[in-house]
Image (cartoon, helix red, strand yellow):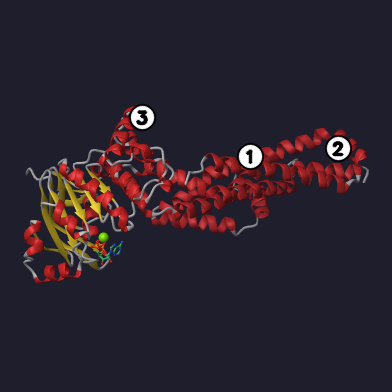
Amino acid sequence: MTNNLLEIRDLHKSYGAVEVLKGVDCTMRQGDVVSIIGSSGSGKTTMLRCINMLEEFEGGTISIDGQAIGYEIVNGQRRRKSEREIARQRALTGMAFQQFNLFPHMSAVGNVMLGLVKVKKIGRDEARAVAETWLDRVGLRERAEHYPGQLSGGQQQRVAIARAIAMNPKLMLFDEVTSALDPELVNEVLQVIKNLAQDGMSMLLVTHEMRFAYEVSNRVIFMNQGRIGEEGNPREMFHKPGTERLAEFLKSSTFN
Amino acid sequence: MDIMHFLDVVWLARMPILKGLGVTISISFLAICAGTVLGVFVGLALTYGVRPLRWIVRGYTDFIRGTPVLVLVLASYYVLSTVGLDLGPFQAGVLALAVFCSSHVGEIVRGALQSIPRGQTEAAKAIGLTFPQTFAYVLGPQALRQVLPAWVNTAAEMVKASTLLSIIGVAELLLRTQELISRSFMSLEFYFFAGFLYFTINYAIERFGRYVERKTAVPT
Ligand SMILES: Nc1ncnc2c1ncn2[C@@H]1O[C@H](COP(=O)(O)OP(=O)(O)OP(=O)(O)O)[C@@H](O)[C@H]1O
Ligand SMILES: [Mg+2]
């Protein structure tokens, strides 16, 4: 037992014959804000998706608050946990996706309420109140009854973040939540994430926004070809990259 | 044709016509309901079933869809009895139509479910919904909107296909009409009138589809 919030040990993941994660280790403490950077195809998304079991993984362990995620060892055999148990564990983390993935047939508040009512089994009235509070926090109180099709990309992403956060996860996962947005809509979403970080939310975020990663995180992980190439505090990482790889990567990405 | 005389004849024949209409509606209603329920399961199996199940169900739908409905009706009536399942003509006919309907609905449901972006399932999983919940609240409602137009078509086809039950002696609208014609010799008039009734049923189904579509429309 440790007091780490997230503990990833020797994570291996392949798609068919292609090994995408080749032994990733990572730990996070309560309140940490960790950014994952790295070139396309280095396995950032895959790592995030393993943490909430959107992907299976063949080797290594992931635990959140000391709970082994997805798999357990029974009589020396590694076994996938039951679907029910995995569903329950997924609620430990919240995830925001690049493409928002709001439910198009539900209003903004309906999107946020669904998990509260069906997973947390909170009564509808209370769930609505919680959902409205979170929509308020992301600046969308007056848009509560709007449907995703009636919202801008930035607004949709903020609803999606509210939907995830309202579940009161221990850890938030963000996968390039601004890369599908028009440039003028990026900031409103980044601001929401910054506010959450300031409130002490633990988060792990994949991003191509280097300045944002620099400002918001207390640690940065550089992924390189399925491994952690380098990690450290943002200041060191961005100003004094320790590896040739990272230096190259930083040069090729715009720090704006 | 003398319209007054014709209406007179129809009025005199109202009881057999109404009975036939009632039987046609019952056949269609039962076949569509049973076929839709079964078809949803077929669609689920085709989309989410484990491989062996998927193959079996795929075989079932392809076979059924490739068989003329009349053959299904005849087989259901004559062949099932040889294996000890003795159904009356009405039951056998409804069974055949329901089976036929289920294979079409299954295909429609599969198409609709597969067209829903993967991100929907992932977002549902990410908030901790189990698969049955994901289906009930996220995938099902979205699929419903997509299947409606095709479902209305299939339902209308079922009403038309119900006429085939006349061949195994179910006294539905067409058989009643033919009986009336053989007595009155007003074939044009009665066929026309029957056609009008079939059109009315299908028009009602289409209105119902539109109504559900409107009710479930999502504001954009
Ligand atoms: N479903 C999949 N099937 C097969 N290969 C996949 C699948 N998903 C990802 N990959 C491969 O795994 C590797 C890592 O992908 P991943 O999406 O984790 O990269 P990433 O670091 O998030 O990249 P990006 O910055 O472009 O989002 C890539 O080579 C990708 O082609
Ligand atoms: Mg990615």
Please tell me in which quadrant of the rendered image residue A38 appears: bottom left
In the structure shown, which secondary structural element does the residue marked by tag 3 occupy? helix
Within the displayed image, which quadrant is ligand 1 positioned in?
A: bottom left
* Residue B71 vs residue B180, the one in the foreground: B180
Q: Which mark is residue A21?
A: none
- The number of numbered badges drawn on the structure is 3
**Residue type (three-letter) at the residue carrying disc 1:** Phe
Image spot of residue B100 (x, y percent): 60, 50
Chain label for disc 1: B
Residue beneath disc 3: A124
Residue at mark 1 to residue at mark 2: CA–CA distance: 25 Å
Chain label for disc 3: A
* Residue A23 vs residue B216, the one in the foreground: B216
Chain label for disc 2: B
**Are callouts 1 and 2 both on one chain?**
yes
Residue beneath disc 2: B10
Image spot of residue A241 (x, y percent): 8, 66
Residue at mark 3 to residue at mark 1: CA–CA distance: 36 Å
